[in-house]
Image: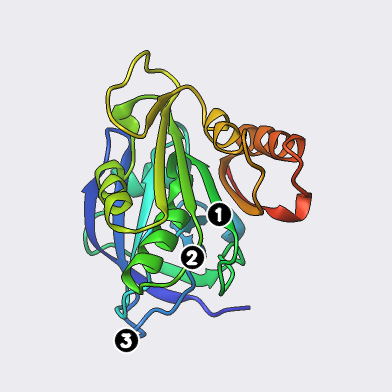
Amino acid sequence: MQAWQKGIIVAIEPETNFTKKFFIQIPEVEKFDFTPGQFVTLDLPIHEQKNKRWRSYSIASAPNDTNIIELIIVFLEGGAGTDYLFNEATVGTEFLLRGPLGKFTLPEKIEKDIFLICTGTGIAPFRSMVQYLHQNKLPHQNIHLIFGCRKQTDGLYLNELRKLSKHEPGFHFHACFSREESLKEEGCYTGYVHHVYEQLLAHEKKPAAFYLCGWKNMIDEAKERIIALGYDRKDIHLELYG
């Protein structure tokens, strides 16, 4: 079991009306080492029982040789953790933090196409992964990041990932908006994430690995559809939110 360390909020930035970026410093280390895709657990002052105070969030930033990490968090109505973070926590707020944790990570050698499929703040581990690959010029096959949310105003890291798709060979960003009727931007779709990977794989079933991160309903449906395309369960990796 990893030890708890002190975390300090050093910056808070709004991303959308309902999501914020929290930049957290871990001052006890000079460099916070983690593998893209991992998460941290925060111990927040919201309950007397320890395990009811713990909230886990994927790290949205790539490893950068510093002791500061970025989390992207959505406000949940009635959620004690996000109510505290959004309405009480400020720059300078301290709490205990444990991590990095988790095995939701890419292989060291990416020898087949990768589909990163997510909804909402499930984009966090994938943003960490693709930024790390880009910054370190690591070789890879085609990587399709397929992100879904309701409206364009709910979109997370849209401009950053669109820009990255123009500068990182083999990286493709697809944004899906289920409550939009028409879209003009390149790489944007109306509807749900499932139609995108099904369309991309409709003509040629190439060797691929699928990483799913988001709400249970999306993950359950994606697993069924990916298996129906002829892929094996071992090709599917998942991180469940909520």
| Mark drawn on residue 140 | 2
Position of the N terminus, as image quadrant, is: bottom right
Which residue does the image show at 39% across and 44% down from the upper left? 173
Which residue does the image show at 30% across and 51% down from the upper left? 21
Question: Of marks 3 and 2, which one's residue comes earlier in the chain?
Answer: 3
Q: Image height check: is 63 above or below 19?
A: below
Name the quadrant containing residue 97: bottom left
Residue wearing tag 1 = 114
Q: Image height check: is 139 above or below 16?
A: below
Tell me whether the residue at label 1 lies in contact with that at label 3, contact meaning CB atoms closer than 8 angstroms.
no
Image coordinates for residue 24, horizontal then vertical, percent: 31, 65
69 or 170, nearer to the observer: 170
89 or 12, nearer to the observer: 12
Question: How far apart are the two marked residues, 1 and 2, measured between alpha carbons?
Answer: 9 Å
Residue wearing tag 3 = 30
Which residue does the image show at 56% across and 73% down from the upper left? 109
Image coordinates for residue 83, horizontal then vertical, percent: 39, 41
Image coordinates for residue 142, horizontal then vertical, percent: 49, 55
